[in-house]
Amino acid sequence: MRNYYRALGADALLVIVFSVLGTLSHNGALTIVNLARVAWPFLAGLVLAHLVLRAWRVEPWRFWPHGVFIVAITVVTAMLLRTLTGAGTALPFVLVSFAVNALFLLGWRIIAGIIVRRKKASVGTENSH
């Protein structure tokens, strides 16, 4: 379960980084209010994704299908919430949101998966000696 909380924390941190970068790239003031306004739909989508996928029951670094669905549910939910609240959902924003969140949320999973596989492989070779 500890690994799950680390994964959720990593996901949330990266969604916040995405929100910070987005705010700064549009010359927005980096205030708590602005950051919360940008981040909350994505964080809500992320929580929903973890709940729907029951993410605590699988290896948190799994790219497929776990990571891919985390990204999809997070961004689709965020776009729905932004639409319902009158925030922008222009096509370039939607595409950038998918691309950056996929890079962040899948990127750490790929790196973690490689590390885990290498550790398992090294333990396997140590046990065979």
Image: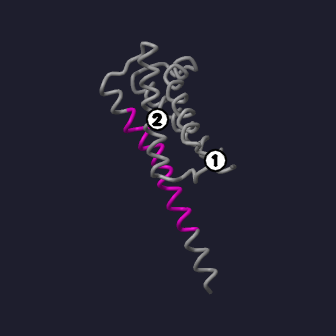
Residue name at image x 60 percent, y 41 percent = 8
Q: Report the magenta residues as a range.
A: 97-119
Pick the residue in front: 8 or 35: 8
The quadrant in which residue 27 appears is: top left
The one of 68 and 126 positioned closer to us in this rendering: 68
Q: Residue at x 58, y 69 (%)?
A: 120
Q: Quadrant of residue 123?
A: bottom right
User: Along the line of sight, which residue is nearer the eye, 29 or 129?
Assistant: 129
In the picture, the quarter occupied by the C terminus is bottom right
Q: Residues within 10 Å of mark 2 (few under 14, many from 20)?
A: many
Whether 100 is among the magenta residues is: yes
Mark 2 secondary-structure assignment:
helix
Amino acid identity at mark 2: Ile
Q: Residue at x 63, y 47 (%)?
A: 4
1 and 2 marks in contact (CB < 8 Å): no
User: Which element type, helix, strand or loop, lies under badge 1?
Assistant: helix
Marks 1 and 2, Cα distance to the nearest angstrom? 18 Å
Q: Name the residue at the top extreme.
A: 86
Q: Residue at x 55, y 19 (%)?
A: 31
Residue that label 1 marks: 4
Direction right: furthest residue: 2
**Neighbours of disc 1 within 10 Å: few (<14), some (14-19), many (20+):** some
| Residue 20 covered by magenta stretch | no
Q: Position of residue 35 (x, y in %)?
A: 53, 23
Q: Main secondary structure of the magenta part?
A: helix
Q: Amino acid at mark 1?
A: Tyr
Which of the marked residues, 1 or 2, is nearer the chain's N terminus? 1
Q: Position of residue 32 (x, y in %)?
A: 58, 20
Label ID, residue 73: 2
